[in-house]
Image: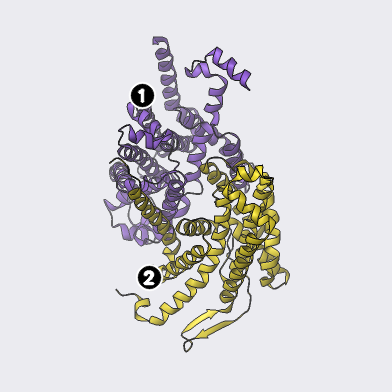
Amino acid sequence: MNKVKQKDLILYSGLIILGLAAPYLFSAFKVQLTYLCVLIVLAMTWNLQGGEMGYNTFGNILFYGLGMYLTASVQVGMFFPLAEWTESGGEKTFVHTTAQYFQGIGVGLLVSAIIPAIIAGAIGYAILGLRGHYFAICTLGLGIAAGEIAGGIEIIGAGQGFTTPPFPAEIVDTEARGKFFYFLSFALLIGTFVFVKYIYGSRFKLILNAIRDNEDKAEAMGIQTMKYKITGWMCSAFFCGLAGGIMGGLIGYIDSTDVAFDGREMGVFMVLMAILGGKGTLWGPVIGATLFHFFKEGLWTLILGWQYVALGVLIVVIVIYFPEGLMGWLREKYPERFGEVIDEKDRKAQVELK
Amino acid sequence: MDFLIFKAPMLMVQASLDGILLGILFALIAYGMALQWGVMNIINIAQGDLVILGGYIAYTMYLVGIHPAWGVIVSPIIMYFVGVLLYKLVINKVVDRDLFISILATFGIAIVFQQLMNFIFGADVVVAQSEYGTTMLFDNSVTLPNSKIFSAFISVLYAVALVIYMKKSRLGRAIRATAQNARAAKILGVDTEKVYAATFGINAALCGIAGALISITLTLHPYVGLPYTVRSFMIVIVAGLGNLPAVALSGMGLGLFEEFADYILGTEFRIGAVFMLLVFILVYRRFKLSKKREYLK
């Protein structure tokens, strides 16, 4: 047991060192690395929902988009009138000082974590009572409705979009912006991973699994399923909101349907990444997101214009042929590695039966 | 309440007529949705994109110089084969599996369709001109495009024809038998694989008809498929599977809701209102059902 722990320690410290060194080693790819961190966070939080709880949601994009708008709105609204900023070219008339910028983004991120979590809690009782595919379609509707509605609200830029505050010009170092957002997202990634790992060792995860496997039975056993479902969703919303806030600052421009409530890209990506890696595992979403990101960045430029066709085909192939994902496949292949003991007699009997 | 629609009652008549005529069209798409859901137990997110593809077939005919109204005959024939092909390639692997798998797989198909249509037909909003003129009612205060009346008429015609076909023909009976109990149907000699392919083909053909009608009454764009999927989904869950009069009624209800939402909330919130209605219907249904089930509280 001790040996395993030591192995883990080496693995984690290695990964953290790699993560900290990455922006210096691959300094041209800082934006991509930030993306990767955010994608992993999204995949891991989706996995809490879809993988552990069995509630396949398309709606986490709602919290992501909310976080994006909230961070930007708070960052602007703290110092300047929001309506004038979004009206036209506000970023040219009003300029954040360095201190204002960082204060703004700090408070904005705080708000963008808390408000989506509160909203998730508020609508959770109604939405999480739906089961199976009804839940999937309902959350899909929620995400798209949010995008359409945000596209009609004047104060956050409506259809013409919302330009987030530019990085303060007083900082001369051209690398600073990339580094700032990378380390922010890396910190978020570590926070999310530690949190999810803590959940994986707790009773809470077992309860979520019980809900996934048979909700009625879990309820009959005396578990207040609704309470745990809402808690799980609030956790997801918390991290999704943060991820959205960071992404908004990084992209620098928020469009209601193409950037924030981007159900066609981000909303599908998080489901796909979690399934690709293997849902219901700790490392699956991490591996899935990394693979997916490399595949996307590598192939996207080669097949310019055809990337959505490739994405669609990829979804169909993964869903139909690899519903268990990479980790599921490995688990089937090397069950001992996952701590599963195989009864040889039983296995032989099974083979004979076949 | 300071809305234009409450000041001018004629606008209400206008909205109601528009809504009902549009609703009949939605009901036709929803009927296809109910058919495949009931028979094959899949939810097809690509439904709306099949509709749009059908519309583009009619639009292509219009570009070539044939009157787009002929699309209601040509488009279903082409779409039937598209549907069967789609079934052979993908759908046959998701029948009998978890519904979420069918949702995701058809989501993938929807993305492929959208992008291919974007390549072939361009990203512009297009409409095929039927040049049917308009009918004026009530002292010219209500205008009704004849193409909308035509489309409602054709929808009803096809729906009635399909109901008769399902009742009387051999294939129709086989489809209904498979819907009731696929296993028993198989034992009694029904080739369920063929039935599934035909069902999906018929669904695609219905989408083709609806699409051809949409190309002359509304507008086409490669990325507007999803709202049609959601509308048909909504109609089916309100009406239930295999209840045709209810499908027609709730289709009209949805059409009315949309037209009124358009006037009251403004056109920019129209699609948003449709999706919010979906959420409300599902949540309402959840509370209604949870009263019947005796959960431990």
> Given the image, on which type of amino acid does mark 1 rest?
Gly
Name the image quarter holding the C terminus of chain B: top left
**Disc 1 residue crowd, few under 14, some 14–19, many 20+, Cα 10 Å:** few
Task: Tell me the tag on residue B264.
Answer: 2
Closer-to-camera residue (A20/A110): A110
Residue A48 in view in this figure: no
Q: Is residue B135 above or below residue A86?
A: below
The quarter holding residue A213 reads top left
As drawn, the residue found furthest toward the bottom would be B139
Instruction: Answer few, some or many: residues within 10 Å of disc 2's Cα (few below 14, many 20 plus, some between 14 and 19).
Output: some
Quarter the N terminus of chain B occupies: bottom left
Q: Chain of mark 1?
A: A
Please tell me the colour of chain B. Answer: yellow
Where residue A155 appears, as percent x and y from the top left, is 34, 60
Work out whether residue A47 or residue A116 is closer to the camera in this orientation and state it: A47
Residue A112 located left or right of residue B177? left
In three-dimensional space, the C-alpha distance between marks 1 and 2, rounded to whole angstroms, equals: 52 Å
Q: Position of residue A6 (x, y in %)?
A: 40, 13
Q: Position of residue A283 (x, y in %)?
A: 46, 27
Disc 1 secondary structure class: loop
Residue B52 placement: quadrant: bottom right
Q: Which mark is residue A87?
A: none
The kind of secondary structure element at disc 2 is helix
Rendered residue at 29%/43% (across/down): A114
Which chain does the purple colour mark?
A
Q: Which mark is on residue A201?
A: 1
Q: Image check: A322 left or right of A37?
A: right
Q: Nearer the viewer, residue B8 or A88?
A: B8
* x and y, in percent, of residue A76 in the image: 31, 51
